[in-house]
Amino acid sequence: MTRGRIAVRTAEAAQARKLHALISANLEEGHLLPRTLDELVVHAERFAIAVRGKKIVGCAELAPLSPHVAEVRSLAVDRLDRSRGVGTLLVDELRRRARREGFEKLCAFTHAPGYFIQMGFSIVPHLWLPEKIFTDCVKCPHFRQCGQHAMTVSLDEARDRSLDEARGRPLELVVDDGRPASVARYA
């Protein structure tokens, strides 16, 4: 498989089927909750997608939970593109969007806390995120037995810059189809 340029941009409703296929492919591992196609059509513009050429290789949704807290939801990367930084690019883009939209905190619920810790998130008690519990968790069939870790990160711009520098992964902002897009080049 050729490594190449990955562009991160906003999804469109017309891409909902591709998002659904990517999320569904990742469901088998048991780390994501299912999403309906209708739900993805409605919320497509909340998704950041990672694209190589014309192929969507990753996606993640910025889901508002309250005026202060947003969640990284449905983070999925194509099996062949894992361990190449695609997920980190997506989370970094959601972090920038969340800050731009005025959120103070970004959260994630995950079975892989180490992955998010590398991006500056911290494990917190679930009760510290009542917005998530009362929005989604109480309706979930896995409520109180999901085994996920609640993670949060403050949306402090200076802290984010230092994390990018520490990772040695400065991102170059370019315009892609008239919309801002983050681009990374892989060696």
Image (cartoon, rainbow, N blue to C red):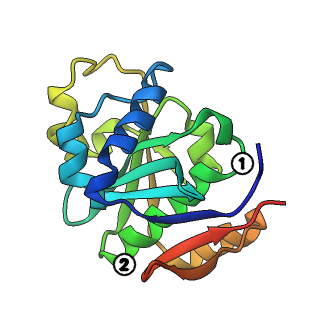
Three-letter amino acid code at the position of disc 1: Arg
Lower sequence index among marks 1 and 2:
1
Q: Quadrant of residue 81?
A: top right
The reply to whether the C-beta atoms of the residues labelled 1 and 2 are less than 8 Å apart is: no
Q: Residue furthest right?
A: 187
The residue that disc 1 covers is 84
- Residue 139 location (% of width, % of height): 14, 27
Crowding at mark 1 (Cα within 10 Å: few <14, some 14-19, many 20+): few
Q: Quadrant of the N terminus?
A: top right
Three-letter amino acid code at the position of disc 2: Arg
The residue that disc 2 covers is 100
Q: Quadrant of the C terminus?
A: bottom right
Answer yes or no: is residue 179 visible.
yes
Q: In whole angstroms, how far apart are the C-alphas of marks 1 and 2?
A: 26 Å
- Please tell me the numbered disc located at residue 60: none
In the displayed structure, 39 sits above or below 107; it is: above
Mark 1, mark 2: which one is toward the viewer? 1
Residue at (15% x, 39% y) in the render: 134
The one nearer the camera, 30 or 50, is 50
- Residue 90 location (% of width, % of height): 52, 57
Say which element carries label 1. loop
Q: Going by the image, does 60 lie left or right of 185?
A: left
Q: Going by the image, does 71 lie left or right of 36?
A: right
Residue at (31% x, 60% y) in the render: 12
Q: Quadrant of residue 67?
A: bottom left
The one nearer the camera, 35 or 22, is 22
Q: Quadrant of residue 45?
A: bottom left
The one nearer the camera, 55 or 62, is 55
